[in-house]
């Protein structure tokens, strides 16, 4: 069954800051592919560092690796935030995740939050995944 992440109207989903440690694969609507680095992630979306901006409102397939396994979902690209020396920071929101992908994402977010609560940094120990 497909999960459709809905932001809670009164509070924002907890974000996990990743720096540049997690790579993401993106497939655009026209079939082209590009790569990005996840800067932050939540159960409802995240922030990508891209070589160049994608069209605001574009729907893409997004995939990345977590401690719990791969996460693959559909996302809507939002307006770019700002340019950097490495490209552009651009937010996205998940529009559809299969139940298993949603479970893996939430499990990984909980894992990182638990480690942060204990004062440990999982990002230093396991690069390229959350």
Image: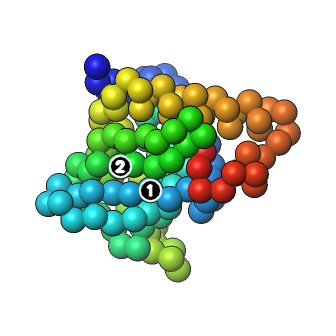
Residue 112 picture location, percent across and down: 68, 37
Residue at position x 69%, y 51% in the image:
126
Query: The residue tagged with tag 1: helix, strand or loop?
Result: strand
Rendered-image quadrant of the N terminus: top left
Residue at position x 37%, y 41% in the image:
72
CA gap, disc 2 to disc 1?
7 Å
- Residue 81 appears anywhere in the view: no
Rendered-image quadrant of the C terminus: top right
Specify which label sits upstream in the sequence, 2 or 1.
1
Residue 122 picture location, percent across and down: 73, 45
55 shown above or below 5: below
In front: 100, or 86? Answer: 100
Query: Which residue in the rendered view is the most extreme toward the left?
Result: 30
39 shown above or below 110: below
Q: How is the image coloured?
A: rainbow
Decide if residue 46 is on the left or right side of residue 107.
left
Marker disc for residue 24: 1
Query: Do callouts 2 and 1 mark residues in contact (Cβ within 8 Å)?
Result: yes
Query: The residue tagged with tag 2: helix, strand or loop?
Result: strand
| Total numbered labels placed on residues in the image | 2
Residue 83 picture location, percent across and down: 46, 72
Decide if residue 82 is on the left or right side of residue 28.
right
Residue located beneath label 2 in the image: 62
Residue at position x 44%, y 23% in the image:
8
Decide if residue 115 is on the left or right side of residue 17.
right
Residue 43 picture location, percent across and down: 48, 33
In front: 65, or 89? Answer: 65
């Amino acid at each position: 069954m497909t999960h459709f992440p809905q932001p809670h109207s009164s509070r924002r989903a907890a974000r996990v800051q990743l720096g540049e440690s997690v790579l993401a694969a993106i497939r655009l609507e026209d079939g082209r592919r590009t790569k990005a680095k996840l800067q932050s992630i939540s159960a409802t979306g995240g922030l990508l560092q891209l070589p160049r901006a994608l069209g605001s409102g574009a729907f893409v397939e997004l995939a990345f690796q977590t401690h719990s396994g791969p996460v693959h979902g559909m996302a809507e690209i939002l307006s770019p935030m700002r340019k950097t020396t490495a490209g552009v920071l651009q937010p996205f929101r998940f529009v559809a995740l299969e139940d298993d992908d949603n479970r893996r994402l939430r499990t990984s977010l909980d894992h990182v939050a638990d480690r942060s609560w204990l004062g440990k940094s999982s990002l230093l120990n396991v690069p390229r995944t959350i």
